[in-house]
Image (cartoon, helix red, strand yellow):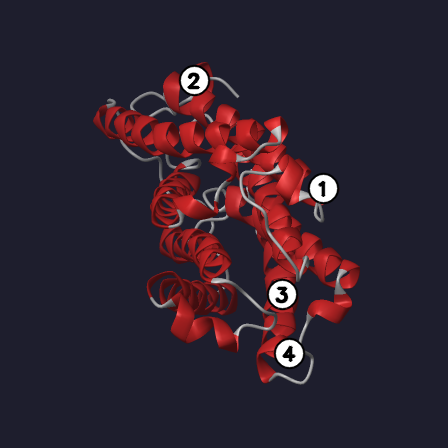
């Protein structure tokens, strides 16, 4: 899509934001590829060594890969209103990940004797230092751009809106707890976490949770399409991660089954968010 398709008076997605979203999609794809292909070799190929259980690295890889459709779909929008559901979530996630990196800098491969690991660590730091700042600056420029929001399209059904809201609140609550009090909360996770990996997962849950909350507020099939695409990928890829490392999950814990139920609720919401607009005759 191009800004030439934007109706007169409607706020377009500005070019710097479009290209930042495309760049971010490439970066998360790279991180997702590293963690998915080299799940058990993070000491060599990733910014920090993620030890057993390997499901943690697989979870993070799936999360990065699931962010790709969110950012690509948002970048392809012509208006700010139909792209913006991605932006606050990305900024939150990248900022919190930078905080986690600073808090746990001793765990990273900055001084590794393996060149690929050391390069990955410094590249990681450069990305998570630069992206939040760049996104904040471009976000401000986007908000100052001329134009208004177009009229809302058909809303999501009530059941979907409240389910997404509930998912968002749940992810935000768990994510904030993992990020702020990792040592107190990590024991309740379905598999073993370290303090750093608890915060890394917490940052993802906060970002996705905020996007879900944002989508419930937008309540417009066209405006939530970036999240819908990400929801589909997130649920499928996390199920694949569980199947890869089935033995890493503490299946005797109620948290494990709550997690599976949560993923099972995410997939149909994503599918309905992507395809349901056809039933409501969105042009």
How many angstroms separate mark 2 from mark 4 (CA)? Answer: 45 Å
To which residue does mark 4 refer? 257
In primary-sequence order, the first of circles 2 and 4 is 2
Where residue 2 sits: x, y (%)? 48, 17
In primary-sequence order, the first of circles 1 and 4 is 1
Where residue 97 sits: x, y (%)? 41, 45
Residue at 44% over, 14% down:
4
To which residue does mark 1 refer? 38
How many angstroms separate mark 1 from mark 4 (CA)? Answer: 27 Å
Q: Quarter of the image holding residue 130?
A: top left
In what element is the residue under mark 2? Answer: helix
Where residue 256 sits: x, y (%)? 63, 76
In what element is the residue under mark 3? Answer: helix
Confirm whether residue 211 shows in the render.
yes
Give the label on residue 3, or none.
2
How many angstroms separate mark 4 from mark 3 (CA)? Answer: 10 Å
In primary-sequence order, the first of circles 3 and 1 is 1
Q: Nearer the viewer's eye, disc 2 or disc 4?
A: 4
In what element is the residue under mark 1? Answer: loop
Q: Is residue 5 above or below residue 133?
A: above
Residue at 35% over, 68% down:
181
Give the label on residue 263, or none.
3
How many angstroms separate mark 2 from mark 3 (CA)? Answer: 36 Å
> Which class describes the residues within 10 Å of circle 4: few (<14), some (14-19), or many (20+)?
some
In primary-sequence order, the first of circles 1 and 2 is 2
Confirm whether residue 74 shows in the render.
no
Q: Quadrant of the C terminus?
A: top right
């Amino acid at each position: 899509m191009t800004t030439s398709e934007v109706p007169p008076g409607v706020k377009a997605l500005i070019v710097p934001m479009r290209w930042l979203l495309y760049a971010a999609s490439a970066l998360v794809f790279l991180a997702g590829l590293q963690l998915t292909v080299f799940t058990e070799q993070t000491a060599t190929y990733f910014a920090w060594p993620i030890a057993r259980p390997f499901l943690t690295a697989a979870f993070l890889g799936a999360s990065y890969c699931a962010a790709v459709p969110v950012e690509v779909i948002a970048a392809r929008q012509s208006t700010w209103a139909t792209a913006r559901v991605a932006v606050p979530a990305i900024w939150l996630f990248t900022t919190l990940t930078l905080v986690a990196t600073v808090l746990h800098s001793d765990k990273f491969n900055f001084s590794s004797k393996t060149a690929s690991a050391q390069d990955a660590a410094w590249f990681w730091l450069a990305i998570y230092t630069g992206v939040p700042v760049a996104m904040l600056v471009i976000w401000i420029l986007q908000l100052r751009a001329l134009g208004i929001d177009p009229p809302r399209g058909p809303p999501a059904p009530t059941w979907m809106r409240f389910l997404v809201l509930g998912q968002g609140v749940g992810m935000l609550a768990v994510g904030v707890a993992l990020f702020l009090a990792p040592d107190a909360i990590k024991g309740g996770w379905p598999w073993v976490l370290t303090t750093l990996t608890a915060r890394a997962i917490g940052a993802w849950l906060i970002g996705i949770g905020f996007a879900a909350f944002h989508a419930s507020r937008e309540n417009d099939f066209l405006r939530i399409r970036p999240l819908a695409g990400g929801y589909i990928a997130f649920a499928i890829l996390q199920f694949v991660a569980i199947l890869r490392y089935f033995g890493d999950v503490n299946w005797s814990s109620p948290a494990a089954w709550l997690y599976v139920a949560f993923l099972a609720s995410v997939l149909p919401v994503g599918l309905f968010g992507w395809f349901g607009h056809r039933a409501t005759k969105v042009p």
